[in-house]
């Protein structure tokens, strides 16, 4: 059972914006950076956002991250069919000698 | 550009030890941290553990009693051992480079390991 809880699903039509949430606590999101990973069918996870809102080179600016208190969110603007897949928030948790945790995942469907 | 490739048995018997190796090219394992992550349909992504550039391990508390990770500096590889596996350990296992605050930015293709 993950300590980072995500909205289970999100959907939109091409061109729309979708957002998804990630809820944690003071021992993880509240005191550490948030990361977002994209998992498309048959592919390895891909880092989309690091340090709450930074995009690695090559990630389109359609993807944006934010954090407030013990929650974070990911927004995808200009939704495209190739965005359909699973999205996971993640970050360090200071409990139990410190360890990394992934969220429960959000399934994005492009209608 | 760093590349990672997982290898090892794809079928492991229940109660035995799962052993995987990750071959790294394009970067020295001496200069980064390295991690193992697994994915299954029912659990999603699950962090297994991380090795820093000194070979010190930090493991998922739920797996800590069964996991061991190590570096092979001579072959630029790192490995994962998971003892006493059960069907719940069936998953796609990924190795990856962990750049700490800059995130886990390079991943292997993944290897499906089935526990029978």
Image (tube, rainbow, N blue to C red):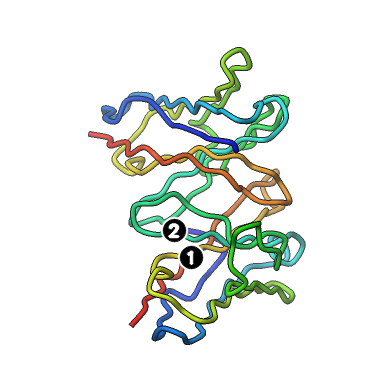
Numbered disc 2: what chain?
Answer: A
User: Horizontally, is B20 left or right of B56 in the view?
Assistant: left
The mark nearer the N terminus, 1 or 2, is 2
Residue, x 77% and y 62% (percent of image)? Answer: A31
Same chain for labels 1 and 2? Say yes or no.
yes
Q: Which residue is mark 1?
A: A87
Counting from the top left corner in percent of width and height, residue A67 is at: 70, 73
User: On screen, B34 above or below A56?
Assistant: above
Numbered disc 1: what chain?
Answer: A
In 3D space, how far apart are the residues under numbered discs 1 and 2 (Cα atoms)? 6 Å
Crowding at dot 1, Cα within 10 Å, few <14 / some 14-19 / many 20+, comes out as: many
User: On screen, A19 above or below B70?
Assistant: below
Q: Which residue is mark 2?
A: A39
Q: Are marks 1 and 2 in contact (CB under 8 Å)?
A: yes
Q: Which residue is outermost to the left?
A: B116
Q: Splitting the image into 4 quarters, where does residue A37 fall?
A: bottom right
Q: Splitting the image into 4 quarters, where does residue B11 fall?
A: top left
Secondary structure of the residue carrying numbered label 1? strand
Counting from the top left corner in percent of width and height, residue A61 is at: 62, 72
Q: Which mark is residue B50?
A: none
Q: Which residue is outermost to the right?
A: A31
Residue, x 73% and y 76% (percent of image)? Answer: A68
Counting from the top left corner in percent of width and height, residue A103 is at: 53, 62
Q: Which residue is outermost to the top?
A: B74
User: Horizontally, is A87 left or right of A92 in the view?
Assistant: left
Crowding at dot 2, Cα within 10 Å, few <14 / some 14-19 / many 20+, comes out as: many
Residue, x 46% and y 85% (percent of image)? Answer: A15
Q: The C terminus of chain A is located in which quarter?
A: bottom left
Counting from the top left corner in percent of width and height, residue B101 is at: 73, 51
Secondary structure of the residue carrying numbered label 2? strand
Residue, x 36% and y 51% (percent of image)? Answer: B40
Q: Nearer the viewer, residue B27 or B79?
A: B27
């Amino acid at each position: 059972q993950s300590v980072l809880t995500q909205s289970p699903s999100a959907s939109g039509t091409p061109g729309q914006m979708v957002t998804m949430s990630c809820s944690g606590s003071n021992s993880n999101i509240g005191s550490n950076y948030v990361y977002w990973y994209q998992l498309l069918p048959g592919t390895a996870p891909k880092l989309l956002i690091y340090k709450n809102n930074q995009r690695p080179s090559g990630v389109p600016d359609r993807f944006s991250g934010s954090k407030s208190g013990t929650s974070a969110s990911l927004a995808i603007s200009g939704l495209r069919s190739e965005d359909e897949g699973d999205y996971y928030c993640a970050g360090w948790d200071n409990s139990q000698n410190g360890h990394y945790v992934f969220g429960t995942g959000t399934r994005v469907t492009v209608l | 550009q760093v590349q990672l490739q997982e290898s090892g048995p794809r079928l492991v018997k229940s109660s035995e030890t799962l052993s995987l190796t990750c071959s790294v090219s394009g970067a020295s394992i001496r200069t980064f941290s390295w991690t193992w992550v697994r994915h299954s349909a029912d659990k999603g992504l699950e962090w297994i553990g991380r090795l820093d550039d000194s070979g010190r391990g930090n493991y998922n508390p739920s797996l800590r009693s069964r996991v061991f990770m190590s570096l092979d500096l001579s072959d630029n590889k790192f490995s994962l051992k998971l003892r006493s596996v059960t069907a719940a350990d069936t998953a796609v296992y990924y190795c990856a480079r962990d750049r700490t605050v800059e995130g886990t930015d390079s991943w292997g293709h993944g290897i499906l390991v089935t526990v029978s």
